[in-house]
Image (spheres, grey):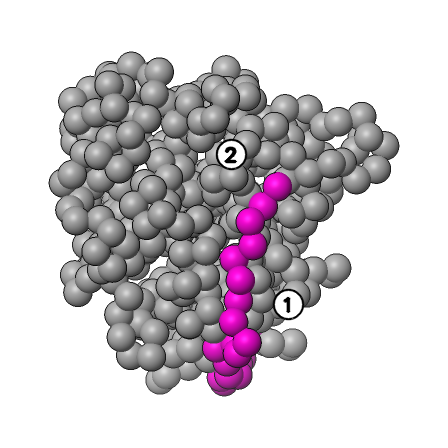
Amino acid sequence: MAVALVLVLTAAHAQQVAPAREPASKAAAILTWPPAQRERYIAALDSFFLTRTVKAGPRAHVLDRGRPLPAFETGGQRASDLDGFMNAQRVRGLLVLQDGRIRLERYAPPHTAATRWNSFSIAKSITSTLVGAAIKDGYIQSLDHSVARYIKALQGSAYDDVTVRQLLTMTSGVRWNEDYTDVNSDVARMYAQPPDPGFDMTVSYVRKLPREAAPGVKWVYKTSETNLVGVLVSEATGKHLADYLSEKIWRPYGMERDGEWMVDDVGHEQGGCCLAMTLGDYGRFGQFILDGARVDGQPIVPENWLADATRTQVSTGAGTGYGYQWWTRDDGTFEGRGIYGQTLHIDRARRLVIVFNSATEQPTGRESGQARQAFIAAVKAEVDADKR
């Protein structure tokens, strides 16, 4: 699930001529593109849109090779299941880490380990982690402060009495429609119309929205609110979101390649979407979280941050919930998710990180979601069997 990027392609691009890169507020209508065309965008975000680089450092965190999962290897009893899953769900990269070691890695040509894939809403989980870092660094004093304390342009709006915590859990009570199939939904309109001059794109749109419930009462999934979380971090730290990410995680932890983060008309990164990175770097971020968000043994977030961020803060259904921009389950596992099948699954008990880079036919769907969860369960069954 993630932001739907709306507007038609320029005539130049329709004729296979590379368009001029544009800000997020003029993003193309990827939901209407043919799958092959959409996939080219997902694998080359910074060719279509304006981005800011998240700079990597000189040394990469090494992902050593572990023991392969025999069932998924050539001739294994689940080899055909793997191929079928990747084909049916248009999975272009798949990575399984256990204890920081690669147990399964696959790519669908022409994609390789060097391909930077659009995160869509997995970016939300990364932006949330930067809130924890900003608290640890003293830039944000309390999750119970008003959002408008940090984003001055929201003063006098429906966000005036919404706390940072309520923003993180998407329980602001501000009315919002995130229907990716509705061209008149809020998420579509936000990404279709130019912002007021000088305003962040999201702030420009949401400061005019009405309230539908008291803060903290009703959960509604809103990409806009993670965009606001990104603005909040930037305002509090006085730094571009991409630069702060580079400073706190990308360089010191050792991501292998630069990331690219889509920006709006005033150069603000979209905290709720569209951070492109390699499959290996998705895995590294998952391992970073699994290991307690530590760099050289020192946590970059407060002591209880990850425990709170990755547990259910609000229920979203039987056995499932939402934390601080992470999808949670009662079994203790949690995920970052994006539309078109993007998945970062973390299982603390098994010390597992599972990543899918994909470009499914539809942005969301029960059937594709069930297929991903079934494959994750199959991986875990083989991991458990391999230990016996």
Name the one closer to the observer, 85 or 226.
226
Residue at point 53%, 78% (across, down): 59
Q: Is residue 64 above or below residue 341?
A: below
Taking 12 as reference, is 366 left or right?
left
Per the rendering, the mark at residue 266 is 2
Measured as percent of width and height from the top left, residue 309 is found at 24, 53
Q: Quadrant of residue 154?
A: top left
- Look at label 2 and name its amino acid: Val
Local crowd size for mark 1, using a 10 Å CA cut-off: few (<14), some (14–19), many (≥20) = few
Taking 317 as reference, is 122 left or right?
right
Please give the residue where the numbered disc 1 appears in the rendered image.
113
Name the one closer to the observer, 213 or 226.
226
Residue at point 22%, 34% (across, down): 149
Q: Which residues are magenta?
A: 50-72
Spatial CA span between label 1 and label 2: 32 Å
SS of the residue at dot 2? loop
Name the one closer to the observer, 174 or 331.
174
Measured as percent of width and height from the top left, residue 101 is found at 46, 80
Q: Is residue 221 above or below residue 62?
A: above
- Looking at the image, do the residues carrying marks 1 and 2 touch, with CB atoms under 8 Å apart? no
95 drawn magenta: no
Magenta stretch, main secondary structure class: loop
Q: Quarter holding the C terminus?
A: bottom left
Measured as percent of width and height from the top left, residue 189 is found at 50, 20
Q: Quarter holding the N terminus?
A: top left
Residue at point 63%, 46% (across, down): 45
